[in-house]
Image (cartoon, coloured by chain):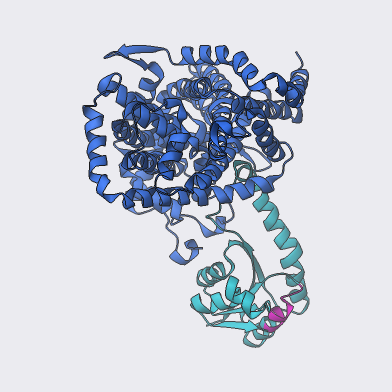
Amino acid sequence: MSIRKSGLTLLGLLISMPVLAEQGIDAKINQAIEPFANAVAGFIFSSFPVAGVAIPFVLVWLIAGATFFTFYFRFINFRAFRHGFQLVRGDYSDPTAAGEVTHFQALATALSGTVGLGNIAGVAVAVSLGGPGATFWMILAGLLGMSSKFVECTLGVKYRNEYPDGSVSGGPMYYLSKGLAARSDKLKSLGKILAVMFAVFCIGGSFGGGNMFQANQSFKQVVAVTGGDVSWLADKGWLFGLVIAALVGLVIIGGIQGIARVTSKIVPFMAVLYVTTGLFIIFSNASEIPAAFAAIWHGAFSPEGIAGGVVGVLFQGFKRAAFSNEAGVGSAAIAHSAVRTKRPVTEGFVALYEPFIDTVVVCTITALVIIVTGTWDPSVDPSQGVALTSTAFESSISWFPWILTLAVVLFAFSTMISWSYYGLKAWTYLFGESMATDIVYKIMFLFFVVVGSSMELGSVIDFSDAMIFAMAFPNMLGIYFLLPVVKKELNEYWAEYKAGTLQKFGDAANRT
Amino acid sequence: MTQVLLVGIDCSDCSHRAVDYAANWARIASARMYVVHIIEWSPFSFNTPQENEKRHQRREAELARAHSQILDPILADLKSKGVAAEGVVRHGHPAETLSALSAELNATNIIIGRKGQSPIKAKLFGSVASTLVQISDCPVTVIP
């Protein structure tokens, strides 16, 4: 089967889309993909009932893993928090190695892949379905997720491939295959299978949560600010998709790094703006803050009117946290492994900040804004996602939805760029590196941008979640076998750190 | 105690006055001399994963180019004039890295040229010379 031919078919589909539009392309795409998306989601989210709520096995898998890692590494998420900051600040960076990828840069790059719509749209879904109490479980899941990130990013750096030309490739596919093979011969084939499984799901995730979900939600927001149902764009999801696909294509196929570079500089600025505005709204409703915290606490343990009671609330919080920070999923390990360090475990410490910033800070701010402004309404249509957050901000600052729209589109764009990279790494792991295989993947990626903005939220969100969560099965399973490796690295390093024998560099050189 | 001179240069053409000045000084005082070029870079920039993947490779290329196109011609010229000097290339913020290097190499003096920007531009963006004068631990000589 020629890969090139299927690539051409997809390209043809892309080009013919405007022509098909007159037949109601959005509805057609939705009809074609929905049954498939639902079937995949149904399988990945195989669940068992707890207290009348269907709890997906994968969620238990992620949270149980994160909790286990937290205990196994004796609360590394709190223990190494300060040291992680010192590493990000550059206290331990050798000035003669300046010019390499720093801890800060690796963290920032990974964060731009995770801080995205999950923080804005996903949280809104969690709070509308699970009530304010979902916030509590979301924060808890974020704190536990830090331990998962610690493990996967340490392994990502330890087992990355360094090529003769100086470029690096890392991520779960490499630590699963190389790491398990190094443990014992018996695990060698298991490692290989897990690595391939991971790569397949990662490609799926790069089309789902890293792509369709982003395109879908940013389109929804653009429609909402331009007039909602009466907006000229309302039934033109395919058009929005084509524009975004063209921009993404310029970066990933055209190699126009300028666009990506500009985005990567605006996105942190938008994130800071989002957080500051969120805090401003929270504090300008200061009288509501005690009630909000009471609602979060009360809602977490004894919710009223939430399907499934405590379990239902917990489920919503955990689910959105996991989807937003991707701890245990393995995606960020791909971005983190580009750092230049002799001690893999240092990147693990730095990675602790990812779920912290993503979930404990940004998601919590979104949740608090929704709660203090009273925009949270249990009867609201849960599929509104980002629209709910937009309304919450609008109730305090009338013009903010426009800024939020810009933020949403930029977050979506940078997340897509990151995920196209993750997906491509998985793709080349499976099919080898060549121009032809690269271009096939990239065209498929662009195709799904258009599909994502044409579909209804329900099936997109389910399919996105399904693909991203599926990555956690091979990833976490392999990690359990590799825990002793991480423990050894950690203990050696921590002993040196505590004894003060790690080389620290002068202040002047590191404040550059 | 031998003096250790550190000459910061931008490019081989525009910094020759600073190099000549330092070379004279080195000859008279039989001082040690370092010719330093700083490649502007920040550890706190935001990059795409694609940039990070190729960063090591690009850094090597930047270092090689700095040596071959900027430092080597100057060092060869100095050698022909009978002044021994060592070349150093670093990534970082120019003024801060020069200052840090001066401490690392136990430099007694820093000598730099000046770009001659307009006063407004220098106010807005700062200049390497004025920042260095503010933060340096050893005397700084600015050659016009």
| Helix, strand or loop for the magenta stretch, by majority | helix
- Boundaries of the magenta span: B13-21
Indicate the colour of chain B.
Answer: cyan
Q: Residue A229 sits in which quadrant?
A: top right
Task: Say whether residue A506 is magenta.
Answer: no
Q: Is residue B111 left or right of residue A6?
A: left
Q: Is residue A337 visible to the viewer in this orientation of the structure?
A: no
Image quarter (top left, top right, bottom left or bottom right) of the C terminus of chain B: bottom right
Residue A119 place in picture, x, y as percent: 44, 37
Vertical relation: A161 (above or below) B60: above
Residue A76 place in picture, x, y as percent: 33, 39
Residue with the most extreme front position: A230
Q: Residue drawn at (58%, 20%), measured in percent from left and top?
A: A200
Indicate the colour of chain A.
Answer: blue
Q: Residue A207 sits in which quadrant?
A: top right
Number of numbered discs visible in the structure rendering: 0
Residue B100 place in picture, x, y as percent: 51, 68
Residue A302 place in picture, x, y as percent: 21, 27
Residue with the most extreme bottom position: B28
Q: Is residue B55 left or right of residue A367?
A: right
Judging depth in this view, the residue of B107 and A299 nearest the camera is A299
